[in-house]
Amino acid sequence: MADLKVGDKAPDFEGKNQNGEKIALKDFAGKKLILYFYPKDNTPGCTAESCNLNDNYDAWLEKGFDVVGVSPDSEKSHQKFIDKFGFKFNLIADTEKEILEAYGAWGLKKNYGKEYMGVLRKTFVIDEEGVIAEIFEKVNTKDHTNQIIETLNL
């Protein structure tokens, strides 16, 4: 599992979005990117987080950021999630968990005393040069936009 830190070069990635189109880190060269990892489409916390980022998407664009979500769900699942909530940004279907692993967002979880492998909810803010500017490991799903804004002093 990756042990990424602020100041590290963001790992390159390429995956397919909800429409089967390739999305890669290089597509965001010269832009800032909020890359968030979430466990599952249409679950309460993931829906709250995605809706919060989407509700503020135009403001993110005005600040020079784009937003991309990543989960191990399929392209079809992502398309249904987007259709249901009207998301304006791409969701990457990382069914092989390659991007999740590269960013340290796939790992051991504990729930009710049981241990299992799963998605570790994390957000990475990547600058125009492809360098990690901030990492959120304790995500406030209901107010993630303000959490990012306050931390980055935007």
Image (cartoon, grey):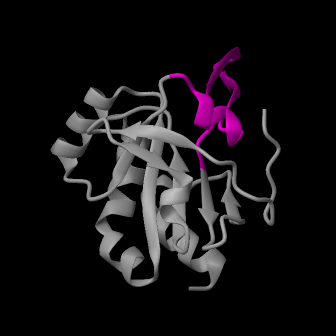
Q: Position of residue 76 (x, y in %)?
A: 26, 28
Closest to the observer, 59 or 98: 98
Residue 46 on image: x %, y %? 42, 42
Q: Decide: is 15 above or below 132.
A: above
Q: Which quadrant of the view contains residue 139? A: bottom right
Q: Is residue 9 visible?
A: yes
Give 152 or 111, whichever is nearer the viewer. 152
x 38%, y 83%: residue: 62
Relative height, residue 116 to residue 126 (above, below)? above
Image point 78% across, 63% down: which residue?
6
Q: Is residue 90 left or right of residue 122?
A: left
Of the pair 126 and 137, the residue shown nearer to us: 126
Above or below, 81 against 62 in this view is: above
- Any magenta on residue 26? no
Find out whether residue 102 is within the magenta segment: yes
Counting the numbered discs, the total is: 0
Quadrant assignment for the N terminus: top right
| Residue positioned 17% across, 43% down in the render | 84
Indicate the quadrant where residue 119 lies.
Answer: top right
Say if residue 119 shows up in the picture: no
**Residue 74's x, y, as percent?**
36, 26
Residue shown at the point (58%, 42%) measured from the top left: 121
In which image quadrant can residue 25 be found? bottom right
**x, y percent for residue 133:** 70, 69
Q: Which segment did they paint magenta?
A: 96-122
